[in-house]
Image (cartoon, helix red, strand yellow):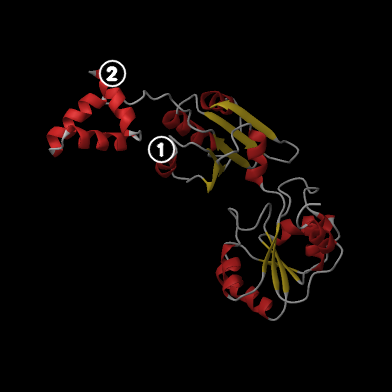
Amino acid sequence: MKPGENAAAGDMSHRLAPGPTLYLVATPIGNLEDITLRAVRVLKEADLIACEDTRQTQKLLNHYGITTRTISYHEHNEMTRAPELVLELERGARIALVTDAGMPGISDPGFRLISLAIRHHVPVVPIPGASAFLAALVASGLGTDSFRFSGFLPAKRGERRQVLEGIKASPRTQVFYEAPHRVMDAVEDIVEILGADRPVVVAREVTKIHEEFLRGRAGEVLENLQARDAIKGEITLLIGKAEETARPAPSRVSVRERLAQVMAEEKLDEKAALKKIAKEMGVSKSEAYRELQRNK
């Protein structure tokens, strides 16, 4: 049995603990079945659900027969709503925070409330689940050993190109969200700045009915997008690592040449100079001496 498995099993069979807690609940990014049993239970037993869009969340709640009261919490009201919710928490409420899809705080509202709750010593509990960028990454075919998620690419062309310049030699997969009406412009910039051969994946409508992965070199993906009448849906844009190019081995000065240089510049005798050179090369003095003899 894995560490924590007993605790997880126990957590599934009991109601939420009394006392104030802010639960960060991941919700499906498309398919309503992509929600955990724990998330459903938390949403049912919470005193209040703070939603990015109450109408969107209500579809999920209706699907699972959840009747918990909801309240809006989005980017336009979080400045005032976050303190209100913290007051509720301090009075003992158990609040579940959700966004329209995915994990709260990941390119979605949540950070202000989360940080404020922590400052007020309110327990914050993540309820993990679906995440668009992780789902797209693992199915992309690009390297997952090292990657960077950077949220949305800048909408302005100059700023977007500056970001792309910054990842030109990146040794890791780069993951971004992008608006459907800007994705073609973004891939055009990738072709121009990173090259037509850079591996790119456009993941569209992940987990939904029209899920699609466009995989290939940037130039090929761009041609595919240009051939379409329209591009719709939620987009995750992934850029492969920069290909490693073989570098010529640096030329090494011979022991004989370096010896003459050190003796002249530092006024050392041959013995002292040879000792210094051996240390520079990371070899023993006798090995440096043998190489010196071979070069004579």
Q: Quadrant of residue 145?
A: top right
Going 17% across and 31% down the picture, which residue do you hit? 261
Q: Earlier in the sequence, mark 1 or mark 2?
A: 1
Residue closest to the eye, 108 or 90? 90
Q: Residue 125 appears at what percent x and percent y?
A: 69, 64
The correct choice, above or below, for 270 with respect to 32 in the image is above
**Marks 1 and 2, Cα distance to the nearest angstrom?**
48 Å
Describe residue 291's horizontal placement relative to residue 217 as left or right.
Answer: left
Question: Based on the displayed image, in which of its 4 quarters is residue 269 positioned?
Answer: top left
**Residue 286 place in picture, x, y as percent:** 32, 30
Query: Which residue is at 71% across, 62% downward?
Result: 54
Query: Which element is circle 2 on?
Result: helix
Q: Quadrant of the C terminus?
A: top left
Residue 230 position in % (x across, y down): 61, 33
Which marked residue is nearer to the observer: mark 1 or mark 2? Answer: 2
Tell me if mark 2 has few (under 14), some (14-19) or many (20+) residues whose alpha carbon lies within 10 angstroms of its own: few
How many circles with numbers are drawn on the protein?
A: 2
Establish if 21 lies above or below 64. below
Disc 1 crowd rating (10 Å Cα; few below 14, some 14-19, many 20+) is some
Q: Amino acid at mark 2?
A: Arg
> Residue at 68% across / 52% down in the picture?
102
Label 2, on which residue? 294
